[in-house]
Image (cartoon, rainbow, N blue to C red):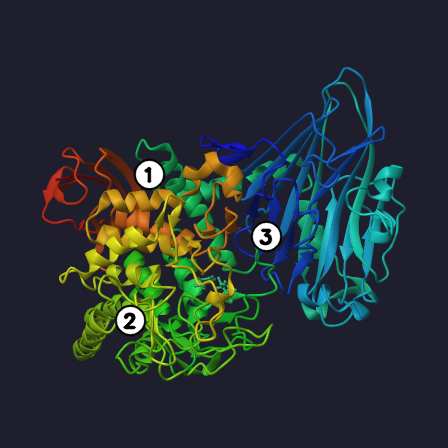
Amino acid sequence: MRFGHFDDARREYVITTPRTPLPWINYLGSEDFFSLVSNTGGGYSFYRDARLRRLTRYRYNNSPLDMDGHRIYINDGGTIWNPGWQPAKTELDSYTCRHGLGYTILQGEKNGIAAAQELFVPRGDACEIDRLTLENKTAAPRTLDVFSYVEFCLWDAMDDSSNFQRNFSTGEVEVVESAIYHKTEYRERRDHYAVFWANAPVTSFDTSRDAFCGVYGGPAAPEAVKAGHCSNSIAHGWAPVGAHHFHLTLAPGEKKSIIFGLGYIENPVGEKFSAPGIINKARAEAMMARYATDAQVDAARRALADYWQELLSGWQLTSGEEKLDRMVSLWNQYQCMVTFNMSRSASYYESGTGRGMGFRDSCQDLLGFVHMIPSRARERILDIAATQFADGSSYHQYQPLTKKGNSDVGSGFNDDPLWLIACTAAYLRETGDWSILDEPVAFDNDVTRAQPLMEHLRRSFRNTHTHLGPLGLPLIGRADWNDCLNLNCFSSEPGESFQTTGPSEGPVAESVFIAGMFVKYGREYAELCDHLHLTEEAASARTAIDAVEQATLTAGWDGAWFRRAYDAFGAPVGSRECDEGQIFIEPQGMCVMAGIGRETGQAEAALKSVEERLDTPYGVVLLQPAYTTYRLNLGEISSYPPGYKENAGIFCHNNPWISCAEAVLGHGDRAFAVYKKTCPAYLEEISEIHRTEPYVYSQMVAGRDAPTFGAKNSWLTGTAAWTFVNISQYILGIQPTLDGLRVDPCIPHTLASYAVTRRYRGAVYHIRVENPHAVQKGVQSVTVNGAPIAGTLLPLAKAGENVEVVVTMG
Ligand code: BGC
Ligand code: NOJ
């Protein structure tokens, strides 16, 4: 069952009922100011950091769900409704929600009044614009009371939701005409405030939640909305809110718009006040003047559309397979932008207070984003590298606002350093910008210890190489990619962190997955050394890699698949010797992607085992058999009930690894079959079971051991980046290399042809792939601008050039 449809021409997903199985959201903003908005107008806003600079409140885990948001109420002669249905939940005569590229439009109609709420964050400005357009579709004049409503967060979202003894006394606002200023803590150390404005004179306003909602009222039926007017309340402490009220009349057929804005303003410390206790509003006034008219808002919308048009034009696919085209050309790349911006911090499943930016997460997100805006990728790589310690290990997370590592989690996740090599190498393949390796970068944010980025990569490589265990495989530390496989943790107290309990330096527990990474990314590192003429370093790196590869093929091999790990007692994990957890997905994907066992047949065998033991119609589960009891020696993985999350759920992030691995072995049919299983557009028809948005990937889908089905944790997942890498590079075969673009597809034999437009190092390649013999792999000939070339590596074109490429498979 569907709850809407794709509108490919407008690049939107159109939701046609507010009763989606879960809130289906969109992200507004792409640089500093961000808003989450659901299909019923729920959500919240923040500036840069969802924890430290939260503008509006959001209550997770509430019942009913999704009550806080960007609200508009209409009181039409006692009938109270919202254009997005929530929170009043009055039945609407018609409803649609259009989630588009950086904007959302909620359209509701009731008793002949149509209301459209258009939300977006303009390019280059720290605000959200909400334009409300009302239309009287009847033959009689209509008088309405229209209200806006947001509830302010007192900036630090953690503190805001816990430190009530202080916070109930600190809230402060100022009101000037239609502008409501939220200035809590501005009197002391903050240099920023929020402004919630409207472009027309208000009839009344409120800034106290008690006054607007009523102490025992709530957003579903605020007292002020019921009464038809606000009480011009000024909040002192308690809960500051912003609400505008307009009493207006619409003539028959008349349309009227009101533009609302929610802005974030920062003032230099010396310019904070215009008079004692009065905030300096000059920057806010300038911001309001930029969006005072419909023409200005239209222009800002156009600028946003142009921005996305330009971004997406760098990678476009026409294959005749509608679902594939829309995922590759649009939604997958859009999600990559969102994961690049958010890492795992703020979604409807990540509260924005728990994690900042993940080291490994952000590195992997870059793999799917780097082609879009390489300059931002460059900046991000340098930020991430600056949180590395001098020994090559790294903080596992950092806060985007301060760019400093989070010491509560610390370091010791032994896969982290290698992901830095992965994303830097991807950046170099995309851009050829070797200067990045010379950039001085701090260690642990200490600039006095800055070293060139290349030295950071060297230490990443060495950190793994010098932390091998008894079998010659890398030590796992607190965890590798699988945060829940905690082999050195031994936590028995409820509430203890699985990851940080126990020593990270476990001298025995080893990871076959990190071994696969070391071979794959170690080789990429050695290639960088080759390029820099560091011949001896490249050779010694390769010697170290070969040894780990051998250890993987022997100690890491279980007979028909790669083992997962060795625990702190040296016992295998992911082996037929185990009673549960006999086979895991991660090492099969990563080791085969690294090419391990390709010549010996072990790679083929491993993928066969995956198909036999882990495959389901909706994706490949993480492990089998699921753990049915908690295991002290394995940690969090066994804390989940069977079939959920890392305990045998379909963890979407590593499904593309299997698809990539199949492509490495030339199995195009199987690679694409695996791709389709988790691809949201292909699951649209079962939205009532899948439950999360059909336009983006979710972190996990309950596995076959789970009693209840469905996906969870949509949007912020490494699945977005890895799927884009998989489909664009491994399957469709458009591969950036250090020396230029290579085309080497591995496709389903049924795909007869496709065309890709790919911007690369400033030139635009128009690539047509023909598959006349219905093969899965193999290139017979390539022509560039009509002339044949030898091999599959396209000659580098000059920036600005258009290149016509025809690739014939066979
Ligand atoms: C989740 C993991 C996540 C980790 C982060 C765990 O509870 O299952 O998916 O990576 O928390 O700390
Ligand atoms: C989600 C985390 O963000 C990611 O870092 C981790 O690799 C996976 N969960 C698997 O545990």
Residue drawn at x 70%, y 67% is 191
Q: Is residue 167 left or right of residue 620?
A: right
Q: Residue tagged by mark 1?
A: 317
Query: In which quadrant is the C terminus drawn?
Result: top left
Specify whether residue 656 is in view. Answer: yes
Between marks 3 and 2 in the image, the one whose residue lies nearer the viewer? 2
Check disc 3 and report its element: helix, strand or loop.
loop
**Amino acid type at mark 1:** Leu
Residue 649: % across, % down: 44, 55
Quadrant in the picture for residue 331: top left
Q: Residue tagged by mark 3?
A: 348
In this view of the protein, which residue sits in the foreground, 19 or 101? 19
Specify whether residue 732 is in view. Answer: no
Residue 767: % across, % down: 24, 40
Residue drawn at x 29%, y 43% is 672
Residue 53: % across, % down: 65, 62
**Amino acid type at mark 2:** Ala
